[in-house]
Image: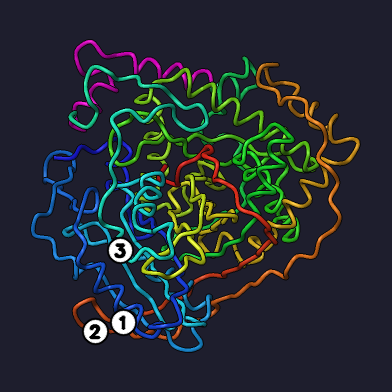
C-alpha cells in the first residue's frame, strides 16, 4: 500500500470547500488542419486505450480510526474520469479560463480515482484544451512535470498517443535536491515502506531512539525567533507568521481567478548568468516588482517587504510530495529593482543553507505544522485566517523543447495550482521551449483584476534589466547583499549590455465579470450537461518576443502545497 508523507496527509486532512487541493496542467493544442473538427473526440478515444499507472491508479482509504492511506483501485473505470466539454462561440481564452476556474473550484470525489481530465473544444481557431485536475495529495509539481513529459511527445510526427494517467516513476536515488536542498538523511529504511504513523511518531520522538527531530524543531524555531528580533546570524529564516504585511488579504472563498504572462527564457538565462543569480531569483524579483506596481496603484503598498512562501524539492523524501515550503521576505518597499534582486538572492541563499543543515523529515514536519495552523484556524470558522505569507511562488522545472500530442502542437502548458490556507495568491511557472510561462491563481477578493497584475510582468523584467545596467546598480546590489556571508555573495560580473528599446505586443487581458455561457459537456462514454460556469477571474497573456530556444534550468521551487 503506498505510503503518505506528512505533507500528503495534511492535504487530505486540511482540505475544505474554500481550499480544495486541486492541481493540474492547462494545455492548449493546435491540431493539424486535416481532421481538426474531430480531433478532440479522436484524442479521447485513443487516450482511453492507455494503461493506468501510479499515482493515478490510487484512491483514498480513510478509516474511522487512524490515518488516511492510499490504495490501488483495481476496478477503476477510466471513462468515468475523462470528460468532454465544448465551449459556446466565440470560444475565447477568457471563456476557457472561466470554465477551468469553475472546474478547479470543485473538490474531487475521494471515493474514486483522485483525478479528472477534461478535453475542451470550441476554442477560437479550432484549438483544443486539456485540463488535468488532480488531488495534490498524490503528486507534487515535479512529479506532474514528469507525468506531462511522458504524455507529450517531442516529435511532431509521433503518432503514438499517450495519456496523463500512465504514471510517474521515481528513481531510488534522485540526487541533490533543487536549490541545494537536503541530502539523503534516512538511509536505514525506505520512506516508501514506512507507515505515516511510524514516520509521525519518529518525528515527534515517540519511536525508540528518535528524538532528534523534535529537538531540531525547537532549535529551528528558537533561531527564527532570534532572527525576527534582530539577534543572531544569517543562518535562519524569520519566525512563522511574523512581519507578514496585511495586503492581498480577504476572506477564504472557493472562487478563483486565473491569468498568465510569458517571458523569453533565452534572455532570462543570459541575464541571470551575467548577474550571477538563478532563474528562480529572477522570477521572485520580477513578481516582486510587478506586485509593488500593482499595490501602489491601489494605494496599498505596505511599509514592510512582502513575504513569499517557496516550495523546495527534497532528495530521497517519501510520499507523493517530496517538498518542504519555507517563507522569507522579498524586497523592501522603495528599493530599486537592482537592490530587490540582491535582497532576494541573499534570502534564497539563506534558504539553501538552512535546508543543507536540516534533515528532510524535520523540514517536512516544520512545513506541515506551520501551514497546518492556518488551516485549523479556517476550519474553526475564522475565514480571515492567519497569514503565513502574502503569496506562494514556485518553479517546478519545465520542458526544454516544443511538445506535441497526436500531431497537434502544444501552444501553452499552464500550471493551475492551489491557494493554501494562509495565502490568497499563487504564482507558478513552467518553461515550454523558448518561453517562461507564469501562471497566477488567486481569490478574486484578494487580487481584483488579476489580469492587470499578470500584464505587469514583462515590464517588470525589462525594468530589472535596465536597472542593472545603470552605473549605480553595482553599488546598490553590493549594499543590499552586504549582510550575507562572502561565500554567498554574487560573483562579480560585467554589467549586461544596455538593450535598445524594443516594441512589445500589448498585453492581452480578458475579464470574466459574469458567469461563462454554459458549455455543452459530455462524458467520454456519453453526453452530460455542462457544469455551471461560475464567476471566474481575469486572464491575461503578455507575450515577449523570442528568437531562439534554450534548455529549461532546474531552479528552486516545486509547487504550491498547503504548504
* Residue 311 spot, x, y in % from top left: 47, 39
The circle drawn on residue 160 is: 3
Tag 1 residue: 521
**Is 86 left or right of 481, judged from the image as shown?**
left
* Residue 194 spot, x, y in % from top left: 19, 28
Q: Are marks 2 and 1 in contact (CB under 8 Å)?
A: yes
Q: Are marks 3 and 1 in contact (CB under 8 Å)?
A: no
Q: Secondary structure at mark 1?
A: strand
Can residue 104 be seen in the rendering of this structure? Answer: no
Magenta stretch secondary structure, dominant: helix
The circle drawn on residue 364 is: none
Q: Residue at x 77, y 36 (%)?
A: 339
**Residue located farthest toward the right when viewing the structure as drawn:** 471
Q: Earlier in the sequence, mark 3 or mark 1?
A: 3
Q: Residue at x 51, y 22 (%)?
A: 354
Q: Tell me where residue 329 sits by quadrant.
A: top right
The alpha-carbon separation of the residues under discs 2 and 3 comes to 26 Å
Picture colour scheme: rainbow
Question: Is 151 in front, or is 16?
Answer: 151
Q: Earlier in the sequence, mark 2 or mark 3?
A: 3
**Residue located farthest toward the front when viewing the structure as drawn:** 157
Q: Residue at x 53, y 76 (%)?
A: 94
For the C terminus, the quadrant is top left
Segment colored magenta: 195-223
Q: Is residue 215 magenta?
A: yes
Other residues around mark 2 within 10 Å, as few (<14) / some (14–19) / many (≥20): few
Amino acid at each position: 500500500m503506498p505510503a503518505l508523507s506528512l505533507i500528503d496527509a495534511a492535504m487530505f486532512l486540511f482540505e475544505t470547500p474554500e481550499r480544495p487541493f486541486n492541481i493540474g496542467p492547462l494545455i492548449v493544442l493546435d491540431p493539424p488542419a486535416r481532421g481538426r473538427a474531430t480531433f478532440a473526440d479522436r484524442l479521447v478515444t485513443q487516450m482511453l486505450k492507455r494503461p493506468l499507472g501510479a499515482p493515478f491508479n490510487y484512491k483514498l482509504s480513510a478509516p474511522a480510526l487512524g490515518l488516511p492511506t492510499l490504495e490501488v483501485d483495481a476496478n477503476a473505470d477510466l471513462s468515468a474520469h475523462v470528460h468532454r466539454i465544448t465551449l459556446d462561440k466565440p470560444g475565447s481564452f477568457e471563456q476557457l479560463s472561466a470554465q477551468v476556474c469553475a472546474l478547479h473550484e470543485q473538490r474531487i470525489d475521494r471515493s474514486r480515482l483522485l483525478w479528472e481530465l477534461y478535453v475542451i473544444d470550441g476554442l477560437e481557431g479550432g484549438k483544443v484544451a486539456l485540463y488535468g485536475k488532480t488531488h495534490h495529495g498524490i503528486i507534487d509539481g515535479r512529479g506532474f512535470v514528469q507525468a506531462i513529459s511522458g504524455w507529450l511527445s517531442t516529435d511532431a510526427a509521433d503518432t503514438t498517443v499517450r495519456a496523463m494517467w500512465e504514471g510517474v516513476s521515481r528513481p531510488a536515488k534522485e540526487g541533490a535536491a533543487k536549490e541545494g536542498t537536503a541530502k539523503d538523511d534516512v538511509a536505514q529504511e525506505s520512506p516508501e515502506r514506512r507507515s505515516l504513523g511510524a514516520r509521525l511518531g519518529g518525528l515527534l520522538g515517540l519511536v525508540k531512539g528518535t528524538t532528534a527531530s523534535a529537538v531540531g524543531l525547537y532549535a529551528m524555531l528558537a533561531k527564527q525567533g532570534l532572527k525576527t528580533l534582530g539577534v543572531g546570524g544569517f543562518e535562519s529564516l524569520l519566525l512563522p507568521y511574523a512581519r507578514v504585511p496585511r495586503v492581498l488579504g480577504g476572506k477564504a472563498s472557493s472562487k478563483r481567478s486565473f491569468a498568465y504572462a510569458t517571458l523569453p527564457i533565452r534572455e532570462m538565462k543570459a541575464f541571470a548568468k551575467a548577474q550571477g543569480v538563478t532563474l528562480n531569483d529572477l522570477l521572485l524579483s520580477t513578481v516582486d516588482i510587478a506586485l509593488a506596481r500593482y499595490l501602489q496603484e491601489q494605494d496599498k503598498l505596505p511599509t514592510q517587504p512582502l513575504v513569499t512562501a517557496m516550495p523546495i524539492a527534497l532528495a530521497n523524501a517519501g510520499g507523493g510530495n517530496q517538498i518542504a515550503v519555507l517563507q522569507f521576505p522579498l524586497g523592501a518597499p522603495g528599493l530599486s529593482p537592482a537592490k530587490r534582486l540582491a535582497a532576494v538572492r541573499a534570502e534564497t541563499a539563506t534558504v539553501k543553507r538552512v535546508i543543507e543543515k536540516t534533515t528532510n523529515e524535520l523540514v517536512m514536519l516544520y512545513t506541515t505544522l506551520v501551514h497546518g495552523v492556518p488551516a485549523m484556524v479556517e476550519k474553526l470558522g475564522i475565514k480571515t485566517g492567519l497569514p503565513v505569507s502574502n503569496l506562494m511562488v514556485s518553479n517546478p522545472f519545465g520542458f526544454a523543447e516544443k511538445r506535441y500530442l497526436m500531431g497537434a502542437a502544444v501552444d501553452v502548458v499552464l500550471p493551475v495550482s492551489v491557494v493554501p490556507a494562509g495565502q490568497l495568491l499563487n504564482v507558478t511557472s513552467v518553461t515550454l521551449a523558448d518561453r517562461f510561462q507564469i501562471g497566477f491563481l488567486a481569490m478574486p477578493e484578494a487580487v481584483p483584476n488579476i489580469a492587470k497584475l499578470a500584464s505587469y510582468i514583462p515590464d517588470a523584467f525589462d525594468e530589472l534589466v535596465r536597472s542593472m545596467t545603470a552605473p549605480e546598480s553595482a553599488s546598490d546590489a553590493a549594499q543590499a547583499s552586504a549582510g550575507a556571508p562572502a561565500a554567498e555573495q554574487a560573483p562579480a560580473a560585467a554589467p549586461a549590455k544596455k538593450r535598445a528599446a524594443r516594441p512589445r505586443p500589448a498585453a492581452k487581458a480578458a475579464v470574466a465579470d459574469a458567469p461563462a455561457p454554459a458549455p455543452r459537456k459530455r462524458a467520454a462514454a456519453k453526453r452530460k450537461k455542462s457544469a455551471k460556469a461560475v464567476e471566474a477571474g481575469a486572464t491575461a497573456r503578455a507575450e515577449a518576443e523570442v528568437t531562439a530556444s534554450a534548455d529549461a534550468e532546474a531552479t528552486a521551487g516545486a509547487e504550491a502545497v498547503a504548504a
